[in-house]
Image: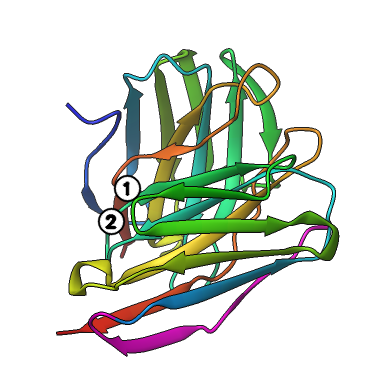
Amino acid sequence: ETGVTQTPRHLVMGMTNKKSLKCEQHLGHNAMYWYKQSAKKPLELMFVYNFKEQTENNSVPSRFSPECPNSSHLFLHLHTLQPEDSALYLCASSLNPRGGTGELFFGEGSRLTVL
Amino acid sequence: KQEVTQIPAALSVPEGENLVLNCSFTDSAIYNLQWFRQDPGKGLTSLLLIQSSQREQTSGRLNASLDKSSGRSTLYIAASQPGDSATYLCAPRGASGSRLTFGEGTQLTVNP
């Protein structure tokens, strides 16, 4: 069982659909992150949760809605997306940097295609 | 705002060569710096993490160095193998333990 698990691995959706990405970590971490990776661009931080509380929102459009019910699970709810939102969405976790090294561990990503 | 540059953008070498990947960052007030590898279409795998108080870290054939004052880190790969082919990313974390900032990566190809 990998440390950080993301489902689904691939998702194709229309612009009017509503879908969710799921992330689960089994590492005992207390911080979780969503990143977006588009072609030819560096990874972009979207959201950070520490101890289930959102501590960063990097000016992400409201059509992306995160949810963190507990320290082990993180969701990204998607609705009314645009084709330019097609990308690899990566989840990561770490111990809170103030209490540990903050070393980041990533999942395998969810490849999203918006038609 | 932290900016990270990785040079070269792409590198192709024959198997067995020793090689150096470079990372520079504009804000030297960092908490730590992490090196990752990414295989095509996959997530990132953590390779090494260097705390701001450290000068280098080693793991197997990999050695990462950090010169915080000059805003530079290097990843040294000894005796490269085809399995090392991947994109290598460096990411310094801000001094307050805040966000990581990623470079665009170095795409490495090791030819048999």
Judged from the image, the secondary structure of the residue bearing numbered disc 1 is loop
Q: Is residue A94 above or below residue A72?
A: below
> How is colour applied across the structure in the image?
rainbow
- Which residues are drawn in magenta? B1-16
Q: Is residue A17 above or below residue B42?
A: above
User: From this viewpoint, is residue A40 visible?
Assistant: no
State the CA–CA distance, disc 1 to disc 2: 6 Å
Q: Position of residue A70 (x, y in %)?
A: 46, 10
| Image-quadrant location for residue B5 | bottom right
Residue at 20% from the left image edge and 67% from the top image edge: B83
Q: Is residue B10 above or below residue B78?
A: below
User: From this viewpoint, is residue A59 visible?
Assistant: yes
Check disc 2 and report the residue beneath it: B42
Between residues B85 and B39, which one lies in front from this camera angle? B85
Residue at 59% from the left image edge and 25% from the top image edge: A49
Residue at 65% from the left image edge and 54% from the top image edge: B101
The answer to whether mark 1 and mark 2 are in CB contact below 8 A is yes
Q: Position of residue A9 (x, y in %)?
A: 22, 46
Check disc 1 and report the residue beneath it: A109
Residue at 28% from the left image edge and 63% from the top image edge: B39
- For label 2, the crowd category at 10 Å Cα-Cα, with few meaning under 14, some 14 to 19 and many 20 or more, is some
Please name the amino acid that badge 2 sits on. Lys
Chain under callout 1: A
Judged from the image, the secondary structure of the residue bearing numbered disc 2 is loop
